[in-house]
Image (cartoon, rainbow, N blue to C red):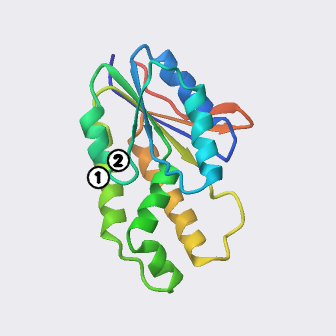
Amino acid sequence: MPAMKELILGGARSGKSLLAEKRAAESGQQVIYLATAEARDGEMAHRIAHHRARRPAEWGCTEETLHLAARLRQLATPETCILVDCLTLWLSNLLFAGQAARQAEAGEAIACPLFDGETTALIELLPQLPGHIILVSNEVGWGIVPMHPVSRLFADEQGRLNQRVAAVCEQVTLVAAGLPLSLKSPCKD
């Protein structure tokens, strides 16, 4: 099967993860679910448990909260479909693990080597990976401009990340109210 990179975007509870799981199941490949979430509170632990409960038992599962490109490089093979859920939580992890969130809060210029390095590594690696990679991300830019500087930084960086990932993916789908809308499809020869 030829390599395929796919981005599935949507708002909270839009059905984007369900669509990603459906496409992974239909890939005919060995599926590895790569989770980026950290259960830092009870509500997030509940969300993680919900996602685990609906995944097929035969799927592999691994977690990576910061070094996504390196983990994808380890896992990707021509026979695998890797479902990354989600880029939004990964971005949040990066912003808070490095100095970016603190710098935004202080009104400083943002200089975060961890964030810059990890996002650039992902964008550069994706086109080179074998197999089917499905990336899930939130579309957060349709609301009002957030009042808090860290929230503004997050919304801006999420939009930039989604654009960069979409540019290197062959397929991009937006999900709203459980309905997929194709934004970019692979070229048919």
Q: Quadrant of the C terminus?
A: top left
The label shown at residue 121 is 1
For label 2, count other residues whose C-alpha is less than 10 Å away and answer few (under 14), some (14-19) or many (20+): many
Label 1: which secondary element: helix
User: Foreground mark, 1 or 2?
Assistant: 2
Pinpoint residue 7: horizontal percent, then vertical percent. 49, 38
Residue type at mark 1: give it: Ala
Residue in the image at 41% along x and 77% along y: 110
In the rendered view, does 67 fall on the left or right side of 40? left
Label 2: which secondary element: helix
Q: CA distance from mark 1 to mark 2?
A: 9 Å
Pinpoint residue 85: horizontal percent, then vertical percent. 50, 40
Q: Quadrant of residue 17?
A: top right
Relative to residue 175, is residue 112 depicted above or below?
Answer: below
Q: Residue furthest top?
A: 28
In the rendered view, does 145 fall on the left or right side of 113? right
Residue in the image at 43% along x and 20% along y: 188
Q: Quadrant of the N terminus?
A: top left
Pinpoint residue 19: horizontal percent, then vertical percent. 60, 29
For marks 1 and 2, the one nearer the N-term is 2
Closer to the camera in the image, 122 or 51:
51
Q: Residue furthest front?
A: 42
- The reply to whether residue 63 is visible in this rendering is yes
Q: Do the numbered discs 1 and 2 sit on residues whose CB atoms are within 8 Å?
A: yes
Residue type at mark 2: give it: Leu
Residue in the image at 32% along x and 57% along y: 118
The label shown at residue 68 is 2
